[in-house]
């Protein structure tokens, strides 16, 4: 059965990383900075850095993405503008992540002179997450039955009142699922942050949004490819990989659990 | 409705509209910035800023290309005759090897006699070629500054040499990367297609609801693993495996990249193909079964032909996923910029090249421009992929309307 190969691949990759990585994980590993040429210590600054980038990118992508999703789905009929906006969203979603990195470097770092900073990195990641947020918001709105909207209009509510009081509360859980999924996507990206924010080695924590930070995915890349002492950095790399995979999988799993919960509820009604 | 209310609604609508334009604006900005930085490559000569190439006045060559310069300084070309000039053997002179031609006393302290000596040397050596900074050029220079041809689009795309930092003349030919990208992507699809289709068929046609509910999250989880983790896995597991399996010197090969990318493209192919198979109307299946066809015949003769366009969309989207992937390929394909047509040799893809080199370039330099030009090529690849998906979708809609 060829299709079980897919399951086997997942099990092998996750199992391998879990088995090699679990021995490295300790309280110290999670809460201290790397030491002695990244062969000892932990990955705390990278965890904090990834946290900063996720929050920063979402501050940009959530409002913009949700608002555009609402506009595209609730305001536009099937006309050229809707088609055009959809096409642009699809195009943006298809742009390779390294091109986002180049664009972020050219626009935010060099042209707007933000320098390598959390600000530049967050905006780059935010743009990358934008199509995901828009698409999932649209899908959430699509799942709201039209009867609810019509009922609200029949009671004399305006379009915006209907969206605020009727459509959004119903669509909220689904929108939330979408937001969680986009966080999962953003926290694992490496290429967009290479030239916009990521620091090779920076044991202190960031103080402002114009600081550079370490980030988990980039730290894993550094550990895996350019350590001076490969033998001794390998365990650190396994540990980092395990932490990164766990974070991303927990985020994705909670999104699918939430989705399943919603399905159950709607079925009961 | 009160007036305040109406104004409020206008403002909200305005905000909603302006947010929805941000995506389009971003796409346009991406294009603008890629071209703004990338086009510079074709407007500049590839020599370093403030450096010139000069020859003797007797030299008849009017203009020189960067490839010819590279050959001259690599000593592959040793006589001007080879470039269609006079029969003089070439004498190279750069600031680094002055001592091979002049002694220290001849140049004097602080190189004060250098301009005079240089002029004498240029006059007496018809085959000379100089590469030096403008500030060292003597005031009444006895030689002739020869213009270097700008890089053309053809040189860029079909050039076989990528030596972006070599001195005196860097070379920007991206043919090795185009070949590398296409080969790795092709390999990835060849790997992912059978497994992906089998899984999609299994999920849509064979598995019951319960198995399907297990497989779906598995595919989603596979899609969620970050690319750098795939790269790491490939580096520590696949690369050594391939190395020992084929008895190679290095395991970082096109094959390793193809397998890792294939795994990464699997979820896309499975999800899209499964949706397509699932969308086949039940009545078609039932009609086929009623005519006495077996399950397998129905699948091969009815379901798959019906969902043909969905399946091709799956393949194209999988290709799109693979072609732009950066980190994983960078980690497992060995970073060789030589043209390579074998699956068991190292190579380097377009995105990997950008990721590996952009950190070392100076802002606004030729190398920086070249990497943006490389990104334009990558961007064009993905646009073609997106457009072909749209075309297939539209054609499919038309066919369905007719049918």
Image (tube, rainbow, N blue to C red):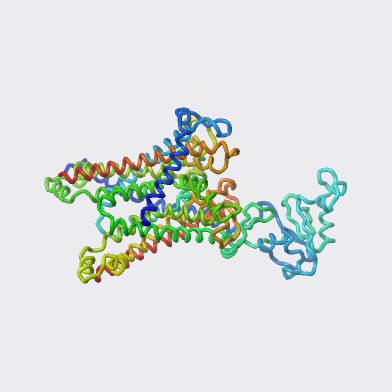
Q: Residue at x 77, y 55 (%)?
A: B93
Q: Is residue B403 above or below residue A23?
A: below
Q: Is residue A150 left or right of residue B295?
A: left
Percent across and percent down for residue A122 are: 43, 41
- The N terminus of chain B - image quarter: top left
As drawn, the residue found furthest toward the right would be: B105
Q: Is residue B295 above or below residue A98?
A: below
- The C terminus of chain B - image quarter: bottom left
Q: Is residue B192 above or below residue A151?
A: below
Percent across and percent down for residue A228 are: 60, 39
Q: Residue at x 18, y 51 (%)?
A: A146
Q: Is residue A38 above or below residue A81?
A: above
Q: Is residue A215 visible?
A: no
Q: Is residue A63 left or right of residue B106?
A: left
Q: Is residue A233 visible?
A: yes
Percent across and percent down for residue B337 are: 59, 56
Q: Residue at x 56, y 52 (%)?
A: B244
Percent across and percent down for residue A131 are: 36, 50
Q: How many marks?
A: 0
As drawn, the residue found furthest toward the left would be: A155
Residue in front for this viewpoint, B121 or B174: B174
Residue in front for this viewpoint, B300 or B150: B300
Residue in front for this viewpoint, A217 or B392: A217
């Amino acid at each position: 059965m060829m299709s079980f190969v897919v399951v086997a691949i997942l099990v092998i990759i996750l199992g391998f990383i879990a088995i090699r990585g679990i021995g490295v994980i300790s309280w110290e590993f999670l809460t201290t900075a790397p030491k002695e040429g990244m062969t000892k210590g932990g990955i705390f600054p990278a965890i904090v850095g990834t946290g900063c980038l996720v929050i920063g990118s979402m501050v940009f992508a959530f409002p913009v993405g949700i608002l555009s999703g609402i506009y595209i789905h609730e305001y536009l009929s099937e006309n050229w503008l809707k088609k055009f906006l959809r096409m642009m969203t699809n195009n943006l979603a298809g742009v390779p992540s390294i091109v986002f990195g180049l664009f972020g470097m050219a626009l935010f770092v060099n042209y707007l002179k933000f320098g390598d900073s959390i600000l530049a990195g967050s905006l780059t990641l935010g743009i990358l997450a934008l199509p995901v947020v828009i698409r999932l918001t649209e899908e959430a709105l699509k799942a709201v039955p039209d009867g609810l909207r019509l009922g609200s209009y029949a009671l004399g509510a305006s379009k915006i009142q209907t969206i605020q009081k009727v459509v959004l509360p119903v669509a909220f859980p689904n929108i939330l699922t979408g937001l969680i999924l986009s966080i999962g996507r953003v926290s694992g990206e490496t290429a967009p942050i290479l030239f916009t924010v990521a620091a090779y080695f920076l044991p202190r924590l960031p103080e402002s949004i114009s600081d550079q930070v370490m980030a988990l995915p980039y730290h894993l890349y550094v550990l895996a490819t350019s350590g001076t002492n490969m033998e001794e950095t390998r365990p650190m790399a396994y540990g980092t990989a395990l932490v990164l995979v766990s974070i991303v999988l927990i985020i994705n799993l909670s999104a699918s659990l939430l989705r399943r919960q919603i399905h159950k509820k709607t079925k009961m009604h | 409705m009160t007036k305040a209310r109406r104004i409020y609604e206008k403002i909200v609508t305005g905000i909603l509209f302006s947010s929805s334009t941000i995506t389009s604006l971003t796409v346009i900005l991406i294009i603008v910035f890629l071209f703004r930085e990338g086009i510079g490559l074709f407007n500049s000569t590839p020599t370093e800023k403030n450096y010139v190439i000069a020859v003797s006045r007797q030299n008849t060559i009017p203009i020189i290309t960067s490839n010819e310069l590279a050959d001259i300084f690599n000593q592959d070309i040793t006589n001007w005759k080879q470039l269609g000039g006079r029969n003089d053997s070439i004498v190279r002179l750069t600031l680094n090897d002055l001592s091979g031609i002049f002694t220290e006393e001849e140049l004097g302290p602080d190189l004060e006699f250098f301009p005079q000596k240089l002029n004498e040397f240029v006059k007496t050596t018809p085959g000379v070629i100089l590469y030096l900074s403008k500030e060292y050029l003597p005031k009444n220079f006895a030689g002739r500054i020869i213009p270097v041809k700008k890089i053309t689009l053809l040189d860029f795309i079909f050039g076989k040499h990528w030596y972006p930092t070599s001195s005196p003349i860097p070379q920007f030919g991206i043919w090795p990367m185009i070949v590398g990208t296409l080969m790795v992507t092709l390999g990835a699809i060849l790997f992912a297609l059978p497994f992906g289709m089998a899984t999609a068929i299994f999920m849509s046609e064979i598995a019951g609801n319960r198995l399907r509910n297990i497989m779906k999250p598995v595919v989603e989880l596979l899609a969620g693993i970050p690319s750098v983790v795939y790269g790491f896995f490939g580096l520590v597991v696949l690369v050594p495996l391939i190395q020992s399996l084929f008895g190679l010197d290095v395991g970082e090969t096109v094959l390793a990249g193809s397998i890792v990318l294939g795994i990464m493209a699997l979820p896309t192919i499975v999800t899209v193909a499964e949706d397509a198979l699932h969308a086949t109307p039940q009545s078609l299946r039932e009609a086929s079964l009623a005519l006495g066809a077996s399950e397998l015949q129905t699948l091969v003769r009815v379901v798959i032909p019906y969902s043909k366009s969905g399946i091709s969309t799956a393949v194209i989207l999988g290709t799109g996923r693979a072609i732009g992937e950066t980190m994983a390929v960078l980690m497992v394909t060995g970073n060789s910029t030589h043209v390579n047509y074998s699956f068991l040799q190292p190579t380097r893809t377009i995105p990997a090249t950008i990721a590996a080199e952009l950190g070392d370039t100076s802002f606004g330099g030729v190398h920086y421009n070249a990497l943006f030009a490389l990104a334009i090529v990558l961007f064009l690849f993905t646009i073609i992929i997106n457009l072909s998906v749209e075309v297939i979708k539209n054609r499919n809609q038309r066919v369905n309307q007719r049918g």
